[in-house]
Image (tube, rainbow, N blue to C red):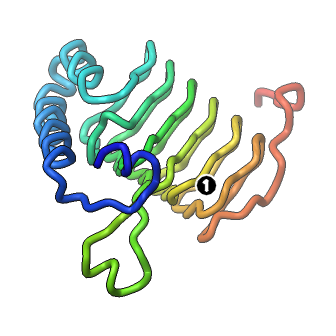
Amino acid sequence: MREKMLAGQWYRADDAELGALNQRARTLSAEFHATYPHDMAGAQVILRRLLAHLGEGAHVRAPMWVDYGAHLSIGAHSFINFNLTALDVCEIRIGEHCQLGPNVQLLTPIHPLAPTPRLKQLEAGAPIVVEDNVWLGGGVIVCPGVRIGEDTVVGAGSVVTKDLPAGVLAVGNPARVIKDLPPDSAFRYP
């Protein structure tokens, strides 16, 4: 069933294999929450067991909520603030040097609109990719199947329903690009 889920095919989440993987995630998440911030080295060890990948120098603040954890990768030197919700029924990749504000939601599940498949408790998913050096402001929601291009900034409270290109500022619900970001050569310190 896990292969169907990761491939974006319709599946039932009450499968025994998925249940065991979810229980593992809940147990490791509870250990992470109990350890952070009192034992930062111990918290890192737990995260490395929970997640598919945790890059060097990445920092995740507790609490963090996942369905499985095993499908979530966080790149080197990325910072994840409090209350990340990463529903990882499909792969979620967060690049290097990213910043995610508090209460960000990365949601890969898809539920059918038709009533009969919903009654049968079918669901599917689509992966999320957050490329390098992306900043997601507090409360940003990223919907299934979205790719956010490198160096892009998404304003607080935005809902990202479609891919965003590299190097832009996007805001709103649904998020829309409001401007291209200037190159580093245009940046001046106050």
Q: How many marks?
A: 1
115 relative to 35, above or below: below
Left or right, 20 with reference to 121 = left
Check disc 1 and give the amino acid type. Gly
Q: Residue placed at 77% from the left, 41% from the top?
A: 167
What percent of the width, then of the height, locates residue 180?
A: 83, 48
Q: Which residue occupies the foreground of this view, 120 or 139? A: 120
Q: Residue placed at 43% from the left, 57% from the top?
A: 9
**Residue under numbered circle 1:** 155
Left or right, 57 with reference to 123 = right
Q: Quadrant of residue 3?
A: top left
What percent of the width, then of the height, locates residue 143?
A: 51, 59
Q: Which residue occupies the foreground of this view, 88 or 65? A: 88
Q: Which residue occupies the foreground of this view, 12 or 55? A: 12
Rendered-image quadrant of the C terminus? top right
Q: Which residue occupies the foreground of this view, 189 or 118? A: 118
Q: Residue furthest right?
A: 186
What percent of the width, then of the height, locates residue 186?
A: 88, 31
Badge 1 local density, few (<14 within 10 Å), some, or many (20+)?
some
Q: Residue placed at 36% from the left, 27% from the top?
A: 52
Q: Quadrant of residue 96?
A: top right
What percent of the width, then of the height, locates residue 162?
A: 65, 60
45 relative to 101, above or below: above
Left or right, 25 with reference to 147 = left
Q: In what element is the residue under mark 1? A: loop
172 relative to 47, above or below: below
Q: Residue placed at 15% from the left, 48% from the top?
A: 19
